[in-house]
Image: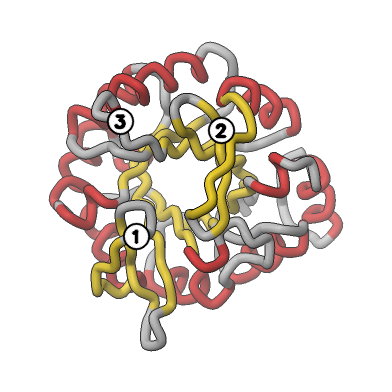
Amino acid sequence: MLAKRIIAALDIKNGRVVKGVRFRNIQEVGTAVKFARKYEEQGADEIVFLDISASLEKRKILAKLAREVASVIFIPFTVGGGIACLEDAVEIIRNGADKIFINTAAVENPRLIKEIAKVIGKANLVVAIDAKWNGEFWEVFIYSGSKPTGLCAIEWAKVAERKGAGEILLTAIDRDGTQKGFSVELIKQVRDAVSIPIIASGGAGRPEHFYEAFIAGADAALAASILHYGKYTIADIKRYLRRRGVNARI
C-alpha cells in the first residue's frame, strides 16, 4: 500500500507566506523559503505553493519562487496560482518545480489540461477544485473562491481526470482555515468518481482530521494553519497516523 502523504500548504502573496479563513482575512506569517526549509525538516512529503498575488508579473514571480525553493529543499514541490497557459506551466517546471496545478484556467479552458499534460506529463499536472455546498450539490468556484460556475465538483473531477489530470487538489471552501476538519463527504464523493490520487484540503485542525480524510479516500492531505502557528508539527501528525495504522513515512 502506498504511503499516505502529508503536504505542507503555503499561500504566497508578494513573495511572503499568508493565511486566511474561507479564502478571506489574509494575514502575513513569514517567508516562503523559511517555511519550506522548516517543513522539509519536519518530515513533509511534499509542499504546495499557491501564489494569490494579483500581479501582472505573475509568471516571473512564480518562476523566481520555483528557483528559490528548488535551491533549498529536496522534497517534491508544486506551484500554482495564476498559471493560465502552457507556456506558464513549462516555465515553472523549467525553474525547478516538480509539479504545477491549475484551477480557474482549467475550468475556463478544459482543453488546457490535455495540452499541459501532453508536454510536462500527467504525473506533473494537478487540477485544483475549490468547492462549496450550494444546498443542492458541491459547486465549483473559481477566482480564489469568489465566482460560482454552476459546475458540479464531482462531475468536473471526472472531466479533469479524463482530460489528463494526474491528481486532484480538492478544497472545501467553507472548511478552509477553520481547523474544523476536512469535508469527509466531499472526499468520499470524489473518491467514488475518479481513480487518480486526491489531495484533501481545507479544515485541518487536529491529527484526527487527517485520519478521517484518509479513511474517506484521500491519498494525501494538506496542512497549513495548524503548522504555521505551531499547533502541531508534521512529525506529530505522522506519529498519530502510524498509531492508527495508517502507512505514513517517518
| Crowd around label 2: few <14 · some 14–19 · many ≥20 (10 Å) | many
Q: Is residue 87 left or right of residue 76?
A: left
Would residue 157 appear left or right of 70 to someone viewing this image? left
Residue shown at 42% from the left, 25% from the top: 97
Residue 91: x and y, percent? Answer: 27, 22
Report the residue at 83% width, 54% height from top: 240
Quadrant (top left, top right, bottom left, bottom right) of the C terminus: top right
The residue indicated by pointer 1 is 146
What amino acid is labelled 2 in the image?
Answer: Val
Q: Would you say the residues marked 2 and 1 are in contact, meaning their CB atoms lie under 8 Å apart?
A: no
Q: Can you say whether 11 is above or below 132 in the image? A: above
Which quadrant would the N terminus be assigned to in this image?
bottom right
Q: Residue at left 37%, top 52%? A: 144
Q: Earlier in the sequence, mark 1 or mark 3?
A: 3
Q: Earlier in the sequence, mark 2 or mark 1?
A: 2
The amino acid type, in three-letter code, at marker 1 is Ser
Label 2's element?
strand
Question: For this rendering, which residue is in front, 99 or 27?
Answer: 27
Q: Mark 1: give few (<14), some (14-19) or many (20+) Cα within 10 Å.
A: few
Label number found at residue 55? 3
Q: Residues within 10 Å of mark 3 (few under 14, many from 20)?
A: few
What whole-number distance in Å separates the C-alpha atoms at marks 1 and 3? 17 Å
Q: Which residue is mark 2?
A: 17
User: Residue 36 in the image: x percent, y percent?
Assistant: 61, 26
Element under disc 3: loop
Residue at (52, 30) in percent of width and height:
76
Colouring convention used in this rendered image of the protein: secondary structure
Closer to the chain start, of discs 3 and 2, is 2
